[in-house]
Image (tube, grey):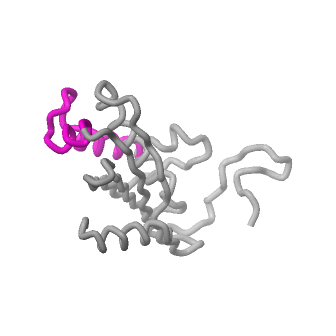
Amino acid sequence: MGFTHFDENGRARMVDVTDKKETVREASAEGRILVSREVFEAIRSGSVEKGDVLNVAATAGIMGAKKTSELIPMCHILPLTNCRVSFEMDQEECAVYCTCTVKVTGKTGVEMEALTGVSTALLTIYDMCKAMDKGMEIGEIRLVKKTGGKSGDVYNKTHHERNRKKKELNIL
């Protein structure tokens, strides 16, 4: 399968989904931010000066998912039917893991919306905590799974390996 966002002359184009059938589609993405011990404890205790970091970041993640088509040029505007942003705090790593799950009934998938939601949530954590730690690192952003649509279901093995490791450590 070739690149679908280019026409026969190599110019960028939006994919035409007019003839595709509407199906229920869902995508989940995850990422993490590594922070200092001080920031980790401040987030956990709710003592960051700017407010409740994880609630603000969850709201930002949902907003980011909803605005994806305004940020990524070839994304279709989608009427999202659900978006959930959740966090797991890993004390040993001083990491906050974020997961964004987005759902739609439509003609195209919501992978970009899930990835944008995670990215926006993690950037919000950075923004709210940067006065305490400018060395925070955002990374490991990836699609975890997608369901629905013509290409079928996709599951990222790396995610499942991390969850298996966490279960062995009794973190879940």
Judge whether 10 appears above or below 172 on screen: above
Judge whether 65 appears above or below 81 on screen: above
Left or right of 106 on screen, residue 32:
left
In the rendered view of the protein, which quadrant contains the C terminus? bottom left
Residue 65, given in percent of the width and then of the height, sits at 41, 47
Residue at screen point 50% across, 67% down:
22
Q: Which of 103 and 97 is in front in this view?
A: 97
Number of marks in picture: 0
Which residue appears farthest toward the top when viewing the image? 131
- Asked which quadrant contains residue 81, the reply is bottom left
Query: Does 119 lie within the magenta span?
Result: no
Residue 85, given in percent of the width and then of the height, sits at 31, 52
Residue 126, given in percent of the width and then of the height, sits at 36, 35
- Asked which quadrant contains residue 121, the reply is top left
Residue at screen point 59% across, 66% down:
20
Residue at screen point 39% across, 37% down:
136
Residue at screen point 59% across, 72% down:
151
Which residue appears farthest toward the right when viewing the image? 9
- Asked which quadrant contains residue 170, the reply is bottom left
Q: Is the magenta stretch mostly helix, strand or loop?
A: helix
Q: In this picture, which residue range is highlighted in magenta?
A: 38-65
Query: Does 59 lie within the magenta span?
Result: yes
Q: Nearer the viewer, residue 48 or 170?
A: 170
Q: Which of 77 and 1 is in front in this view?
A: 1
Judge whether 71 appears above or below 106 on screen: above
Residue 142, given in percent of the width and then of the height, sits at 49, 56
